[in-house]
């Protein structure tokens, strides 16, 4: 059994992407954290309709957040990265309206949902971070709606690849010019409102243009500036955010 990571030794905490914690906040988080759980690839981290007793922060690994319609059709809401907080929705609304599936092995820090009130009482700055995290999610949701409503198929695929690339680079996962990419073309299609045929054609076109390469579950972007232009998105670093 692997040892539990002490918050003092958390590699994510020291990354520029995340807001630094004060010594007081760090001491509280060490008390608040109840443990860690490892989820194998392909397994659900969280099930739609589940009322989870825990909030979870992704320590490592990648996943897909999705929701199923009654007839079985799936909509991918977003992709899950290290530093993301899971379970806030079920903690506040009674049950989760989506599922999260591990696309790689994932390790998650766990925090008891029943003690969230202690966070508000003892650490109001940390409690405000929950609002900040929710605001980051709302901003991304707005960008996603704009993508589905206004970007064409090529622009959608380019936008998704740029966003995934930027986030994985920001959490230190770029190695030898590429980042992990365990997501299937069907995952991209379900996220972007496209058929898998249309998604594949756009990926092939971007590869033939020399802009990207996807192979061996890795993504390389050879011209991020041009891909960002195609996507009609700014070429900038990820916004700094809190981590729980």
Image (spheres, rainbow, N blue to C red):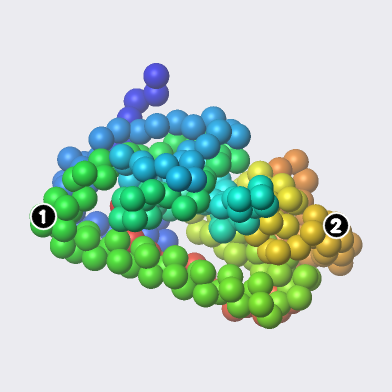
Using the rendered image of the protein, determine whether residue 34 is visible from the camera's viewpoint. Answer: yes
| Residue 190 drawn above or below residue 236 | above
The label nearer to you, 2 versus 1, is 2
Q: What residue is rendered at 68% in x and 80% in y?
A: 150
Q: Nearer the viewer, residue 75 or 209?
A: 75
User: Hey, which residue is sitting farthest front in the picture?
Assistant: 70
Q: Which residue is mark 1?
A: 122
Few, some or many C-alpha atoms within 10 Å of disc 1 (few <14, some 14-19, many ≥20)?
Answer: few
Q: Position of residue 220 (x, y in %)?
A: 71, 55
Quarter occupied by residue 40: top right
Few, some or many C-alpha atoms within 10 Å of disc 2 (few <14, some 14-19, many ≥20)?
Answer: few
Q: Position of residue 141 (x, y in %)?
A: 51, 69
Q: Position of residue 114 (x, y in %)?
A: 21, 44
Quarter occupied by residue 41: top right
As helix, strand or loop, the secondary structure at mark 2 comes to helix
Q: Position of residue 196 (x, y in %)?
A: 80, 55
Please tell me which of labels 2 and 1 falls first in the chain: 1
Q: CA distance from mark 2 to mark 1?
A: 52 Å
Q: Tag count in the figure?
A: 2
**Is residue 199 shown left or right of residue 62?**
right
Q: Which residue is mark 2?
A: 197
Q: Nearer the viewer, residue 138 or 211?
A: 138
Using the rendered image of the protein, determine whether residue 235 is visible from the camera's viewpoint. Answer: no
């Amino acid at each position: 059994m692997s040892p539990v990571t002490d918050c003092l030794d958390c590699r994510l905490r020291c990354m520029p992407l995340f807001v630094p914690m004060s010594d007081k906040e760090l001491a509280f988080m060490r008390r608040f954290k109840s443990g860690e759980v490892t989820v194998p690839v392909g397994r659900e981290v969280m099930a739609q309709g589940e009322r989870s007793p825990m909030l979870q922060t992704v320590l490592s690994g990648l996943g897909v957040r999705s929701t199923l319609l009654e007839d079985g059709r799936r909509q991918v809401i977003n992709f899950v990265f290290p530093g993301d907080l899971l379970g806030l929705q079920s903690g506040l609304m009674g049950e989760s309206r989506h599922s999260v599936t591990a696309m790689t092995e994932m390790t998650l820090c766990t925090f008891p949902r029943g003690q969230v009130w202690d966070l508000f009482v003892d650490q109001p700055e940390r409690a405000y971070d929950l609002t900040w995290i929710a605001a980051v999610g709302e901003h991304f949701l707005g960008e996603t709606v704009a993508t589905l409503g206004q970007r064409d198929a090529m622009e959608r695929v380019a936008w998704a690849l740029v966003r995934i690339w930027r986030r994985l680079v920001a959490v230190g996962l770029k190695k030898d010019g590429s980042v992990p990419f365990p997501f299937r073309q069907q995952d991209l299609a379900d996220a972007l409102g496209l058929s898998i045929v249309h998604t594949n054609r756009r990926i092939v076109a971007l590869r033939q243009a020399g802009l990207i390469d996807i192979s061996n579950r890795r993504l390389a972007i050879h011209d991020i500036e041009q891909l960002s232009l195609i996507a009609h998105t700014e070429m900038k670093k990820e916004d700094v955010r809190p981590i729980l």
